[in-house]
Image (cartoon, helix red, strand yellow):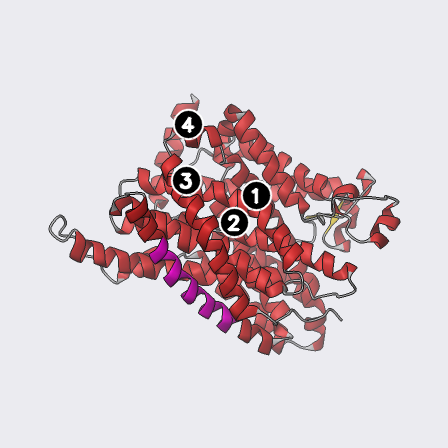
Amino acid sequence: MSEKAETIFWSEKAEAISWINEDWLALGIGFLIFAASLLGLLGTDIVGWVVTTSVWNDPAKALGTASKLYAGLGGAGALLATYAALLVILTAAATALKVNPKRFAVTFTVFFAIAYASWVVGSYAYVAVVTPADQQKFGIDWSLRLTNEGGFIIALLAGLVIANLFPRFADWLKEAIRPELYIKIAIVILGGFIAVTAAGRLNLASSLLLRGVAAIVEAYLIYWAVVYFVARKWFGFNREWAVPLASGISICGVAAAIATGGAIRARPVVPVLVSSLVVIFAVVEVLVLPFLAQTFLSHDPLVAAAWIGLAVKTDGAAVAGGGITEALILAKSAAEGVRYEPGWIVGTTATIKVFIDVFIGIWAFILGYIWTNHINAEKTADKTKAIEIWQRFPKFILGFIVTFALGLILALAGGPELKAKLPAVIGEANTFRVIFFLLTFFSIGLLSNFKKLWADGIAKLAAVYVLTLFGFVIWVGLLISWLFFHGVTPPLAS
């Protein structure tokens, strides 16, 4: 059977499950991983074989297992086990998404190998080590000081190099390039990690939630109106282009552009081009903003966290950017003698992005109602219905809510023995979260072919994006983050 025939065959086989999308799959996969890790609380550790990477200067010591119970596997065995498990789960997901499973399995194998190699390179001592004490420990006298989460940046750069210098290779990998799926799985798992982190500081966690909601309302009511005005009045875009563009820049990137483009019945090319822009500029922001945050906001770490959440426009780049920001700020603070509990910075960034995602469905409904009942009322008989809020609601958020609730209940109501086991159990799930972050970063890089985007005639759209993002959105986001989060700091590590 030819490759084309196989593709058609698997597409037809998947028609019966055509209602399944990345949101539902992310919810299911993320919750499956989280639930499997919780079995460790009952004494059955079935995911402790997942591979972990430590800072290294001896390659033989780079890889290990998340649980000592599986130490006999060794680093190479853990890597193979992790690859095999992800291959099975994600190939099944790809099949449900009407992708040829053989093609996906082959491309994912290469995709995973390059992505994880980037992570290992990012954990090399000369790249990752931060403090003088650790430099002495590893016998080195200098380092790039990116922390081991510098592997995210290495993966992003690897993707960019392939996309722009080897575009045919990037195109060959396209079945495995699924940033939205990967980051949504990661966010579902992250819910439990945030809950366990927050359980010991409920007052602080509640305060952060309220501040995050207020910051989002303030920011996006300002953002959307200004971007829409600039696109219409200064650059002459019609409403069909201005609405998805304003939503993509001001709300939440790809998902918002697609949702609002669909709500106003825009031509498919419109949200596609806007989404491409979002990905490109998310790359730039992730390469720049975490380092600015480390330089200027290390003494206000939650201002930095909120800023990343409000400024970076895709879930993948924002949450992973929050992870890089946390690593950089914690490292700088530790070098100054201040040790914050990990999890609060990335948790704040992720929580803000989740609230923003909730807002997508509501805003798409509002725009759809205005568009079909007023602006284009004479052109369509289809009126926007309230059910569209649910239809456009990002379903993976339900998974985040469930894992957050379970983690919080276990952390607050469990007995002493359970509470003692919980951090290690959640840590194993969180290791998967880090891997899905890594896959997201590599995907984002691979999608960023600058020459192709320029050839698509994207220059005028990019001008709006540059002007509004770097001239307005980032700085308003910083101001609002400062107003709501200044003076609030993560708890100190015990």
Mark 1 neighbour class, 10 Å CA radius: few under 14, some 14 to 19, many 20 or more: many
493 lies above or below 47: below
**Mark 4 / mark 3, whichever is N-terminal:** 4
Q: Residue at x 30, y 44 (%)?
A: 241
- Checking the image for residue 6, the label placed there is 4
Q: Residue at x 58, y 31 (%)?
A: 161
- Checking the image for residue 462, the label placed there is 3
- Three-letter amino acid code of the residue under disc 1: Phe
- Three-letter amino acid code of the residue under disc 3: Ala
Residue 257 visible, this angle: yes
Task: Choose between 259 and 50: the one closer to the eye.
Answer: 259
Query: Which span of residues is magenta-colored?
Result: 209-226
In the picture of the structure, the residue carrying the numbered disc 2 is: 316
**Mark 4 / mark 2, whichever is N-terminal:** 4
Q: Residue at x 83, y 40 (%)?
A: 58
* Magenta stretch: helix, strand or loop mostly: helix
**Mark 4 / mark 1, whichever is N-terminal:** 4
**Residues at marks 3 and 1, CA–CA distance in whole angstroms:** 22 Å
Q: State the image coordinates of residue 195 (x, y, percent, origin top left).
A: 58, 68
Q: Secondary structure at mark 2?
A: helix
- Three-letter amino acid code of the residue under disc 2: Gly
Contact between marks 3 and 1 (CB within 8 A): the answer is: no
Q: Nearer the viewer, mark 4 or mark 1?
A: 1
Q: Exactly how many numbered labels are in the figure?
A: 4
